[in-house]
Image: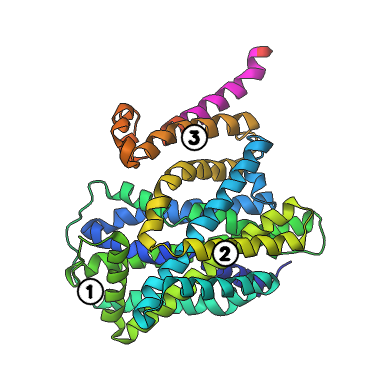
Amino acid sequence: MYKRKTLFLTAFGLFSLFFGAGNLLIPPLLGYNAGDQWFWVTIGFIITAVAIPIIGIMAHAKLQGTMYDFGKNVSPWFSSIYCIIIYVISVAIPSPRTASATHEIAIYPAFGTDPFWTSLVYFALVLVFVLNRSKILNIIGKFLTPLIVIMLLLVIVIGLYNSSLANPATFDTPIVSGILEGYQTFDAIGAIVVGAFIIVSLKFKTIDIEAYEAKKSLIRKAGLIAGLGLFVIYSGLISVGAYYGTEISVDTSLDNDIQRANLLRSISISALGTFGNTVLSVLISLACFTTAVGIVAGTSDYFRSLFSSSNKVYIITAIIACIAGVGVGQLDFYSIIVIAYPVLLFIYPITIVLIILNVLPQRSATPLVFKAVVIVTFIFSIPDVIGVIERLKHLKDNFMFIPLAKHSLGWILPALLVFVLINIFQKSKPHSSS
């Protein structure tokens, strides 16, 4: 059986690997715009940024394999393509985004340096950590996560203590706005990438049912603890953003990323004085760095598994991922968000249904259910993607008959309906043949 120390180190490591640039920057501005409706925005945000990711960790606890296992019930070729797409997306978008956020918020204001040098040093350090992967979970869980959590709680508690009433909401449908903003954290994708990394990191000496159950219990409990931490921090950051709405002026003519950074900086300085700017810089750097390490290590683990567990493949993949990070890291945070959003509207729904299907009992999630639900989700996600591509926006009007399509959630009801119908069909087959 595992020790309690191992449980908390794993939970802290999970929290830190999840908590990156978007996780820190998105909630305060979301709360600011939600105003007095911040509670409903929080509910929506928690669904896609906490609940689904933690269910993903539960699925990993059950499968105890690689990301490939998430999609193999659809088909082997689908799972292979899905894995490659997810890892390429992870290396090309959220990983460089962490370097971009670190540069814009922590490095450039203090030193005025070029983003190339920030990215170069940043990913050189990421590579050092990834190549010493046996120590990653211990270092992140024991040292980095407690520091991140303490600084976050300081900003939240002092910020709420000094705040006043919230402004009226600017959202028409706060809960839907929260759900869609939760996409931007990449946490559902992070769950299957980081979860696979955790599985590999937790090596048990014996492969038997007792070891499997112990590992399953450890991962589940660690996931719940990490999820509770994310819930507390997200709720706190959203509420601080909402209640500080009357204290701080946000220039809405600026890009969203600059608004997010300026708001978070203003909250930190208001809560902690001039020291708050230093706290924010360190906080951003640590939160981003741990996420980048998890993404690069998880990607390297996957490609190593494709080539007979070759350490050479692991090293080459890590180097390529870090070079890609330096290259894409030259873009500003907003540009990366613009690239990411259409991709997320396409891949996120498929990821969500794979996560949910993998935690359900096998009798309710048969290979036929997997195939049908994923295909329907893919088809009904296409209008959502079309709706955010400038040249194709006008075409989305043709799909407004789909329930929830106007909220970019048109895939939900069709996927649910197909899931129910196929389960009814499969359960009725033995009866009809008798």
Q: Which residue is drawn at 56% across and 42% down?
A: 354
Q: Which of 335 and 28 is in front in this view?
A: 335
Residue at horizontal 67 percent and vertical 13 percent from the top = 433
Q: Which residue is drawn at 23% across and 51% down?
A: 171
Tell me if mark 3 has few (under 14), some (14-19) or many (20+) residues whose alpha carbon lies within 10 angstroms of its own. some
Q: Give the range drawn in magenta.
A: 417-432
Foreground: disc 3 or disc 2:
2
Residue identified by numbered label 3: 378
> Residue 376: image x %, image y %?
49, 30
Q: Is residue 307 visible?
A: yes
Sequence-first tag of 1 and 2 = 1
Which of the image's four quarters has the N terminus? bottom right
Q: What residue type is labelled 3?
A: Phe
Q: Is mark 2 on a helix, strand or loop?
A: helix
The residue wearing badge 1 is 163
Q: Callout 1 environment at 10 Å: few (<14), some (14 to 19), or many (20+)? A: many
Q: Which of marks 3 and 2 is nearer the N terminus?
A: 2
- Residue 44 lies, in percent from the top left, at 36, 51
Relative to 101, say whether 112 is above or below: below
Q: Between residues 410 and 259, which one lies in front from this camera angle?
A: 259
Residue named by callout 2: 323
Where residue 207 sits, quadrant-wise, is: bottom right
In the rendered image, the quadrant that contains the C terminus is: top right
Q: Main secondary structure of the magenta part?
A: helix
